[in-house]
Image (cartoon, rainbow, N blue to C red):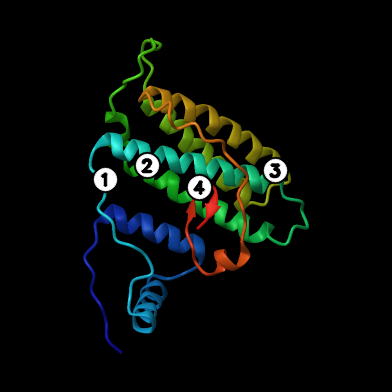
Amino acid sequence: MKSITVRLDDELKAQAEAVLEHLGVSSTQAITHLYLYLAQHGQLPYRIRPVAESPEDVYRATLHRVRAVTGLLTTVAALPADAVERRDLTELCSVRCLRLRQDIAGNAPFLAAAICTDPLPRTDGEDAGLYWRWIGENLARAENAIDQAAPDMNATLTAVAGQLTGYYWQLATYTDQYEINETAVPFEYDRDAAHAGHTLYSGKIK
């Protein structure tokens, strides 16, 4: 057996290990399956893309993810208790909330540095950073409701989705992104696609 030594940023390592722990997967298992995929398919299971560098790029990309998670929360909240896809979607929803919350926390300086370009007057002291923090708090609230299988989970997820929608539009108008006007459509679930590991974008499996 060969061992591998990997150098990682401490914060990135902590975030990734938190996700793996939530999924019940060890670091060794994750790396082993990555190598198995490379050996079997001759390519990575994902695309490596440059990380956006400007605050506005990070702001916009994160805002789109908020919209997608909002649609997923709305769909999970509307699922009947006996729906066959309920378990898979609730687990996916919890993981997506966790990842988004961690990314918001990790990118807090960038998100707060985005310049307000809204031509309309804003309240004194209004800070986009506050909205991002409130989004993180609501995502944690949704995670807790799902992970604890709370009796009022559906009501909690519906309430969180409503809060996120409000914060989304405050943040979208803060940077004058009025063109981001899509509706948070119900999440379209495809069990085969989900199990094949495809990625969620804007509320849909692609």
Q: Is residue 109 visible?
A: no
Q: Nearer the viewer, residue 178 or 80?
A: 178
Q: Is residue 172 left or right of residue 107?
A: right
Give the image location of residue 28, x and y in percent: 37, 75
Which residue occupies 42% across, 75% down? 29
Please state which of the two labelled residues, at mark 1 or mark 3, is closer to the viewer.
1
Q: Which mark is residue 188?
A: none
Q: Of marks 1 and 3, which one's residue comes earlier in the chain?
A: 1
- The amino acid pointed to by label 3 is Asn
Q: Which residue is mark 3?
A: 154
Give the image location of residue 176, x and y in percent: 37, 23
Q: Of marks 4 and 2, which one's residue comes earlier in the chain?
A: 2
Give the image location of residue 170, x and y in percent: 46, 24
Is label 1 in contact with label 4 (beta carbons under 8 Å)? no
Q: Which residue is mark 1?
A: 52
- How crowded is the residue under tag 4: few (<14 C-alpha within 10 Å), some, or many (20+)? many
Number of numbered markers: 4
- How crowded is the residue under tag 1: few (<14 C-alpha within 10 Å), some, or many (20+)? few
The CA distance from mark 4 to mark 3 is: 15 Å
153 lies above or below 168 = below
- How crowded is the residue under tag 3: few (<14 C-alpha within 10 Å), some, or many (20+)? many
The CA distance from mark 2 to mark 3 is: 27 Å
Label 4: element kind: helix
Q: Of marks 2 and 3, which one's residue comes earlier in the chain?
A: 2
Is label 1 in contact with label 2 (beta carbons under 8 Å)? yes
